[in-house]
Image: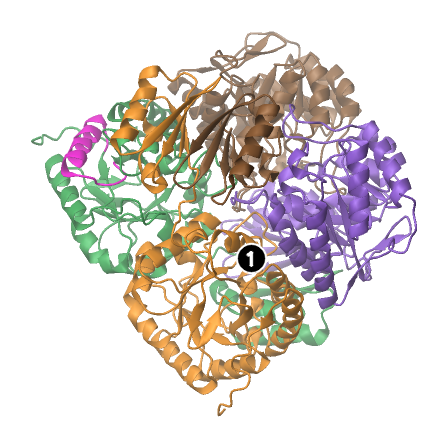
Chain colours: A brown, B purple, C green, D orange
Amino acid sequence: MIIVMEASATRREIEAVCAKLVQEGFSVHLSEGVARTIIGVIGDRTRAMGLALEAMPGVEKAIPVLNPFKLVSREFRQENTIVSINGRVLGGNEVHLIAGPCSVESREQLLETAWAVKEAGATLLRGGAFKPRTSPYSFQGLEEAGLEILAEARERTGLPVVTEVVDPRFVSLVGSYADVLQIGARNMQNYFLLKEVAKVKKPVLLKRGPSATVEEWLMAAEYIMLGGNDQIILCERGIRTFETFTRNTLDLSAVPVVKRLSHLPVIVDPSHGTGKWWLVQPMAQAAIAAGADGLMVEVHPDPGEALSDGKQSLTPENFRNLVASVKEIAVAVGRRLSNTVAGEQLPK
Amino acid sequence: MIIVMEASATRREIEAVCAKLVQEGFSVHLSEGVARTIIGVIGDRTRAMGLALEAMPGVEKAIPVLNPFKLVSREFRQENTIVSINGRVLGGNEVHLIAGPCSVESREQLLETAWAVKEAGATLLRGGAFKPRTSPYSFQGLEEAGLEILAEARERTGLPVVTEVVDPRFVSLVGSYADVLQIGARNMQNYFLLKEVAKVKKPVLLKRGPSATVEEWLMAAEYIMLGGNDQIILCERGIRTFETFTRNTLDLSAVPVVKRLSHLPVIVDPSHGTGKWWLVQPMAQAAIAAGADGLMVEVHPDPGEALSDGKQSLTPENFRNLVASVKEIAVAVGRRLSNTVAGEQLPK
Amino acid sequence: MIIVMEASATRREIEAVCAKLVQEGFSVHLSEGVARTIIGVIGDRTRAMGLALEAMPGVEKAIPVLNPFKLVSREFRQENTIVSINGRVLGGNEVHLIAGPCSVESREQLLETAWAVKEAGATLLRGGAFKPRTSPYSFQGLEEAGLEILAEARERTGLPVVTEVVDPRFVSLVGSYADVLQIGARNMQNYFLLKEVAKVKKPVLLKRGPSATVEEWLMAAEYIMLGGNDQIILCERGIRTFETFTRNTLDLSAVPVVKRLSHLPVIVDPSHGTGKWWLVQPMAQAAIAAGADGLMVEVHPDPGEALSDGKQSLTPENFRNLVASVKEIAVAVGRRLSNTVAGEQLPK
Amino acid sequence: MIIVMEASATRREIEAVCAKLVQEGFSVHLSEGVARTIIGVIGDRTRAMGLALEAMPGVEKAIPVLNPFKLVSREFRQENTIVSINGRVLGGNEVHLIAGPCSVESREQLLETAWAVKEAGATLLRGGAFKPRTSPYSFQGLEEAGLEILAEARERTGLPVVTEVVDPRFVSLVGSYADVLQIGARNMQNYFLLKEVAKVKKPVLLKRGPSATVEEWLMAAEYIMLGGNDQIILCERGIRTFETFTRNTLDLSAVPVVKRLSHLPVIVDPSHGTGKWWLVQPMAQAAIAAGADGLMVEVHPDPGEALSDGKQSLTPENFRNLVASVKEIAVAVGRRLSNTVAGEQLPK
C-alpha cells in the first residue's frame, strides 16, 4: 500500500502515520517527491487497508498496490481449478451447457424441458425453486416441491441439477437436492449466505452482482474458498449500466479478466445478460469466443406461458440452434462441447 | 399496460395476444396507428406484467403505464406515514439525527460516542454489531456482544438504537435488542430477509441498494408493508456510478422523488453516500435542504483508529459543527431538529 | 405516443391535452382505465415528442411507442447497407480488419506499422493525426503532417486510410486525405460536426459515445444520413460503467441490437473497449462471434514507446495472432476475412 | 507515479523500466516488497503518465499519485477565483441566479421571460440560440437571430447574457453578443472548441459532461486556463447513471469536491440535472446548501408551449417561489443572493 500525504502535511503528521504503521508491524519506506511525501507500506495488504489511515491528519489517500483476494488468485494457484459435478468436470478443455427454465413451474414443464435440453446437448439442468422476485406480487417459486421435481428430472435424465439457494436457513435443504448450489446475483454480497454454502460439500455457482466489480466478485468467492470450499464456478450475467435496451449489459471482458486474475472457471448467462431471447444466441457465441468455460441458458417449452422471464427464454428449437452454433465456435477456439451424457442410455 | 406490436405483426398474431389477455380477464383496447398496432390492456398491472407477452410472436414490447408498487404509494395513502420509535416520531415536521460509529468496537468506544452524539443533538444511536464486509479478512463485528453494548448505551443515554440485521436467522435476536432494524444496502433485495423483518413489530430502516432504482427500492418496501409492517424509514445512501472520487454518488433527488411517489419517510446517509468525512457536512446540509426527514451519520471518537469506515467518520467535534449548520438549514425549509431527548435527565 | 394522465387529472385537463393534440394535427384515442386515463396519440412521433406535453397540468408522463430514428432504421431499408471504400465493401459477408497506431508519430513508425498490419491481413489502415486528448499536456497529434504521412502509406501499401476529424473547420482538409472520416466517441453528439461530414462524399465511421445509448447513437447516424450521406459504419468501442479494471465496458450486445434495429454495418474496437492489450484478442474473437462486420485494432511496432495508448496497443506479432484466431471465428459464423488486398503486388 | 511490477517480473524487466525512466529524466525509487517490486517515479506526473510504461514487459500497472491538473488546482492558486461579468462578480460570497428559457423562440418569449426572471431576482439571463439536439427533427434554434434577441434583452433589462457556443467557427460570432460563453455538457471534451474559447476575453461557463469524472471536468477547464483564460465557471448538471426516473443524476457532492480541488467557482443546473420541473426547487435548495456559487434554471412563460425542455422549465411564478426559498438557504449557510441589478431603474 502507498500512502500519499497532502502537500500541506507537516513533518509531525508524516511521522505519526509512520509511527502507527511501525507499531502495527509494517515496514515503511519514505519517498519525498517534489510535491508530495509518499509512504510505501510493506506488509499484508489486507491488514494495511483495515487501518483507517485516510482518517489521519495530513493523509490525502491510501492506494492499494496488491489485489485484495488471495486464495482465489492465480498467484496462489497457478493451474486452473477443475470443478467436479457428479463425474462431469467443468474448467478444463470442454465447454458445458447448463440449460432449463427460469422457474420450475410444474412436473410436466420441467421434465419436458429437461429432456429437450439434454437431447440438444446440455450437460446440466437449471431451474429455480426459490425465486427472488422484484415484486411481491410475482410468482415466488414452488419451493421444496420444486426441488423434488428437479431431483426427479435428474434421476430420469441423468442431468445434474443447478438451483439457487436464497437464504442461509435453506442451505442444507437445497443442498440435499441440488448438485450445484447457485448464489444469485442479488445475493453475491450476502456474506452470511456465502459462509453457509462454503460449508457444504457441493460446488457453488456464484453469479456476479449487477453492480459488483470483478474485484468484489472475486472477494465474494474468497469468502467461500476461505470457508473451505474451492469448488466454485463464477458466472457473468451482466451489470447494470445506463443502457436500458438490454436488461443488463453483458460484460464479456470479465471472462478473460477472471481467467488472468483467478484460477476459478467462469461461465456466462446470456439470458439474464441481455433479457431478450433473440440476443441469447449471438451473445452465447461471443461468450465462448471470449473463453468462457460454459453457458447458462434459460429454455422454456412455451416462453409465452412462462411464469417468469419468458421474454428471455429460448424455445427448445432455438436452443438446438444455439448449441449448433456454439459448437462451431468452441472448435474455433480449440475446445469442444462436453458430451458427457451423450452416450448414456436412460429410460425416458 | 400497453402492448406495442411489431410493424410486421400479422393479424393472427395481434388476435392471439388479445385472446390471451381476454382469457386472463383483462379488457383490451386496440389502436391501429400508421406504423404500429397498439393494444391497451385494462386491468391489474402487476398481473399483466406477470404475463410473458413479450415472448409472444409479433410483440415488440410491453410498456407499463402504472407504477408497480401499491401499498407504499402516495395514491394508496395520501398523508405521510409517521414512524414511532420509543415515543419519538419520524416523518413529521421534525428532523432526526441518527449518529454513532460504523461498528460497535468496544463498550468504551460505544458509550463515549453515544454520549457525545446525544449531547450534540442526535436523537437515535446507530452502531453495527453484525457487519457485512467486502473482505473476509476485515473486522466482522462483535455480533451478540455488540448488541448487548448497544442495549446498555440505550439504557444509559436514553437514545433508541438502530442496528443492522443481515440474516433471517438473526431477526428475532437483533429485534430483541434494537429499536429500529436496519436492512443494509446490499440486502435491499434479500426478499427472504425482508419477509422476516415484516413480521417484527419494530420499525425498519431500509437502505437503498447501490444499483437499485427508486422503483426497485419502493418494491422492496412493498414486501415489508405487504408483510404487515408499515413502520418503514427509507434511507438514501448513494448509488454506484462511474465517478470514483466519492465512494458512491449520493442521489439527493431521490428524496423529493420518494416524497412524491410514496407516503413513507426518507432520510439520508451522507457518510456512506460520500465516503469522505469532509464531504459529510455539506451533503448533510444539502439533504435537509432537499427535504429529508433525517440523517444517519457515522461518528467515531478517534476515526484514525476505527476498525471500519474511519475515513468517512466524523469526530464528535465535527458532528457538533454539522448539527449546528443543519439546524439552520432545517429552519430555512420550515422545519426544526427534533430535541425529544434534550430535556431528559439521565445518569451518565 | 401514449400520454398517461395523473390519477388526479381533471376532465378539463384531459380535454386540454386532447385539444392541443388535435390542434397540432394528431388523432387522439382516449382510454379510461381503472386508475388512469390514457391518451393514445396517432401521428408523427418526432413531432409529438417535440410538444412539451409533460409540462401541461395533469400529465404524468408521455411514453414514446416508436423508435425516434427513421432513415437508419431497418424498417426504412430492409437490406443491409454496403459501404464502399476505394473498391472494398464493408457490410457484406466479409469481415474487415482496420489496424494501425493510435497516433501517427512519424513517417517511419507509420510505414512500418502499415506494412506489418497489411501483411498480417488488415484491409484498412487507421492512424490519428488530430488527437482529442484528456490532458492538454499530452501529445496532440501531428495534424496535417500526419495526414500527409497517412496518404503516403496508402500509396505505398494500397490500404485505404481511416482517420479522425475533430472539428468542422478541418472536415474538407481531412476529407482530402482520408478514405474514411472517423467521428470519435467524444464527438458523437457534436451535431455541427455531423452535419459537415454528412456533406462529404466519403464514408463515415461513427464511434459510439461513452455514455450514449444505442438509440442516441443511431440518432447521431440519422443526422448524417438525413444530411445526404448513407455510407456510415457504426463502431462500438465500450461504454462507461462503474467497472474500472477495464478502460471501458465493451458492450458487444450492441452488435446484434444494431443489426436488428438498423441496416447499417457495425464494427468493434476492442482496443479502446478494454484498454489492455492482453484483452484485445479475446474480445476481438467475441466481437466477430457476436456478428460484427469488422474490427478496429491499435497496433504499434513498439507499444512501450507509443506516444498514446501504448498499453492497449498490440505488437505486430500479437496482431498476427489475433488475425489467425479471428479467421477461425469468422468461418465458424459462416463468414470470412476480407482479403481484398492479399493478391495485390505493391512495391515496398 | 508508482509502477507496480508483476509478481513474475524478472530482474531484467525491472531494470528496463528503471532505465527508461532515468533516460527520460525521472528519478526512480525502488522498493521490493514481499510480493511485488514497486518503482516510485519522481518527476512531472503529466510527462510520466505520457510514457506507455504499462505496455512494457513485466509491468502490472502504473498508478498516478498526483492529480493531473495544475493551473485549475487549489494548490496552484489558494484563493477563490472571482469571475467578473459586466460588473457582477461570481465566486465570492454572493450567490447568483442565471435564468431564462432553454431556447430563444421569439422576441416576445425572450423579453417576457427576461423581465420576469429579473423581477424575481435573477442576475443573469440564459437562452440558447444554437441548440445541440439529440434528434435532427427537433427545433435547432434561431441561431444568429436568437443572439440578436438576447442582445436586445440585455440592453432592455440590464441582465448579462449566457448562451451556448457549439462550434469553433461560431466562437467569435457568439462572443460578439454574449457576456458568458457556455460550453454544453456534450462538448465538454470538444478540445478544439475549448482552445477557441480560451482565446476570447469573456468568461466561460463549462458544463460537466454526462459521463465525465470530476477529474476529467477539471482537465477540460485546464485546457481553457492553459489557453489564457481563467474566467471559468464550472456547472454541475447531472451525470448519466442507471436511474431513469430523473433525466440525469444530479451529483451535488461534486460541488464541495470541486471547491476543495480547485479555485474555480461552481454552480448547479437543477433543470437538466433532474429533467422534471417539480424537482427543480428542492434540488436548487440542496445545491445552495452544498455550497454552490449559483444556479442556472430554465424558466418559460408557458412551459406547455416550449419548443424544448418544457417539462423541466419553471413558470415565472414557480421561479419566484424558488428564489424565495433559495434566499433562506443562502442565509443559512452564511451567504446571500446577489442583488446587483435590484436597485437599477431600467425602462421596460
Residue C9 in the figure: left or right of residue D227: right
Residue B292 percent across, percent down from the top left: 72, 57
Question: Is the residue marked by circle 1 packed among few (<14), some (14-19), or many (20+) residues within 10 Å?
Answer: some
Q: Is C338 one of the magenta-colored residues? A: no
Q: Quadrant of residue C124?
A: top left
Left or right position of A134 against B31: right
Q: Residue at x 45, y 34 (%)?
A: C246
Q: Nearer the viewer, residue B196 or C223?
A: B196
Q: Is residue A345 among the parts visible in the rendering?
A: yes
Question: For the residue marked with disc 1, what is the amino acid?
Answer: Arg
Q: Residue furthest front?
A: A12
In the current view of this chain or complex, which residue is farthest to the left? C347
Q: Secondary structure at mark 1?
A: loop
Q: Is residue C28 above or below residue C116?
A: below
The image quadrant that residue D231 belongs to is bottom left
Quadrant of the drawing holding the N terminus of chain D: top left
User: Which residues are the magenta region?
Assistant: C101-122
Residue D280 at x, y percent in the picture:
61, 65
Q: Which residue is mark 1?
A: D247
Q: Is residue C113 magenta?
A: yes
Q: Nearer the viewer, residue B235 or B77?
A: B235
Front residue of this view, candidates C222 and C79: C222
Chain bearing mark 1: D
Residue D179 percent coordinates (x, y): 39, 74
Q: Is residue C267 visible?
A: no
A238 above or below A263? Answer: below
Residue A56 in the image: x percent, y percent? 60, 38
Q: Is residue D156 left or right of residue B56?
A: left
Q: Main secondary structure of the magenta part?
A: helix
